[in-house]
Amino acid sequence: MPRTDAVLAEPRVAAAVARLGRDLVKRSVTAAQQRARLGEIAPDAVADAALAALPPSATSLRRVLNATGVLLHTNMGRAPLSAAAVDALAVAAGTCDVELDLASGGRGRRGAATVDALLAAVPGAGAAHLVNNGAAALALVATGLAAGREIVVARGELVEIGDGFRIPDLLVSTGARLREVGTTNRVHPRDYAEAIGPDTGLVLKVHPSNFTITGFTASVGVAELARIAGAHGVPVVADIGSGLLVPHPLLPDEPDAATTLAQGAHLVTASGDKLLGGPQAGLLLGGPGPGAELVAALRRHPLARALRVDKLTLAAVEATLTGPPTPTRAALDADPESLRRRARDLATQLGAAGVDAHAVDSVATVGGGGAPGVTLQSAAVSLPERFAAALRAGEPAVVGRLEHGRCLLDLRALPPGSDAALAAAVLAVGPAPRKG
Ligand SMILES: *Cc1c(COP(=O)(O)O)cnc(C)c1O
């Protein structure tokens, strides 16, 4: 049996130690030695086996190809970052000038370039600030403007975001009181007008981003709310959810930041990792004038420090905004015919290798990140159901969708550049059912 020290000293293993850390590699060597003792591998194969069992990087997170047809999958980290954002992360990861003015050598304004990029991307925005996520943006607004006072909000907009988290609970946790108006399905301008009083901190409009209510419904738009609340000097805050900055033709019902500000919202809050296609972040945008003043005040609130984004987020958001279209945007805009062509090409390639694969039409969705009820024409490779579990166990893992006893690999959320990896993952599972 080769000694642990000897195996660790072997150049390839030493290189792995330099990359992944000694503990992780040593555990792998110990496990390989154990296999050799049991006679599963030859003693001179210990180094190879230890190296083969190592993870690709020091994170236990595994790369997943999202073939579900759900563009923004919360369980897969929502938006995948653009290559530009990934490059920016690498720059920011080291020491960088995040709060340094290299020209003067003095202190620089943290995140200024990211805020400028945000202002350039949202026509009509007068000020912007970034926090950790959409929930943090709401928490900052509620704390700063309504702690100990009332938030007027429609009953039909008391949203559960996911994993049991509820916006009304978040708001109340800041010390604000909710003044609920209307009913589940209907709310009218007079409901707001009657509720607003000297104790009102803000009027909140929450986008129902993960459900739709249809039938006998009525709601009050931001423009009308701004008129009603403005008469009392009360700010209107719109939580638009998805981070769409300007209108998108495929998503006519999805509110965007520019339009919402133009309608008179003083403040808009949104997530960075939904339709914006960036990293987890919370956007706080103010309209010109009073909205911008509110942003400036909230940026200086003590709680803002606790919700402050790191240099990685600042870099990735800036690159998301200034770089080429994000993978999320590309997936949204992908033309169905090109998706069908990709599905056919993949099915042909897999079929030639003996896999029972064919191209089928499919229906993709935006996901919990926004645009509920919107469906997007898509295309998929249909495989026998047994592929689902085997593909999830691969490297990279592939997660498809089960439908009518078949495993569908929907191409809408995957960039064309990942088709080769997708084919390789399917071929690694192989054409014949695995034994056991
Ligand atoms: C997603 C969402 C949130 C929460 O945003 P996070 O970035 O997940 O914290 C809040 N409000 C709405 C309407 C949302 O869609």
Image (tube, helix red, strand yellow):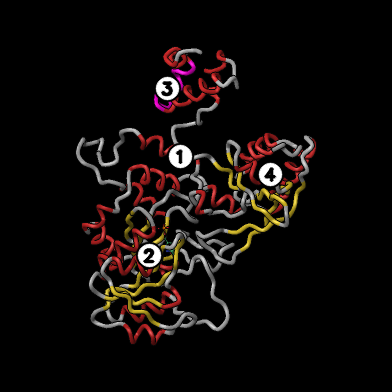
Q: Which residue is mark 4?
A: 387
Q: Is mark 2 within 8 Å of ligand 1?
A: no
User: Can you say whether 300 is above or below 414 in the image?
Assistant: below
Choose mark 1 or mark 4, whichever is in front. Answer: 4
Q: Who is closer to the viewer here, 329 or 119?
A: 329
- Assess disc 4: are there few (<14), some (14-19) or many (≥20) residues with their C-alpha within 10 Å of its C-alpha: many
- Assess disc 3: are there few (<14), some (14-19) or many (≥20) residues with their C-alpha within 10 Å of its C-alpha: some
Question: Mark 4 to mark 2: distance in Å?
Answer: 44 Å
Helix, strand or loop at mark 3:
helix
Mark earlier in primary sequence (2, 3): 3
At 55% from the left edge and 65% from the top edge, which residue is drawn?
372
Looking at the rendering, the quadrant in which ligand 1 lies is: bottom left
Q: Is mark 1 within 8 Å of ligand 1?
A: no
At 26% from the left edge and 69% from the top edge, which residue is drawn?
175
Mark earlier in primary sequence (2, 1): 1
At 50% from the left edge and 50% from the top edge, which residue is drawn?
79
Q: Which image quarter holds the C terminus?
A: top right
Report the side of 60 relative to 194 (left or right). right
Q: Which residue is mark 2?
A: 268
Q: Which residue is mark 1?
A: 86
At 67% from the left edge and 53% from the top edge, which residue is drawn?
402
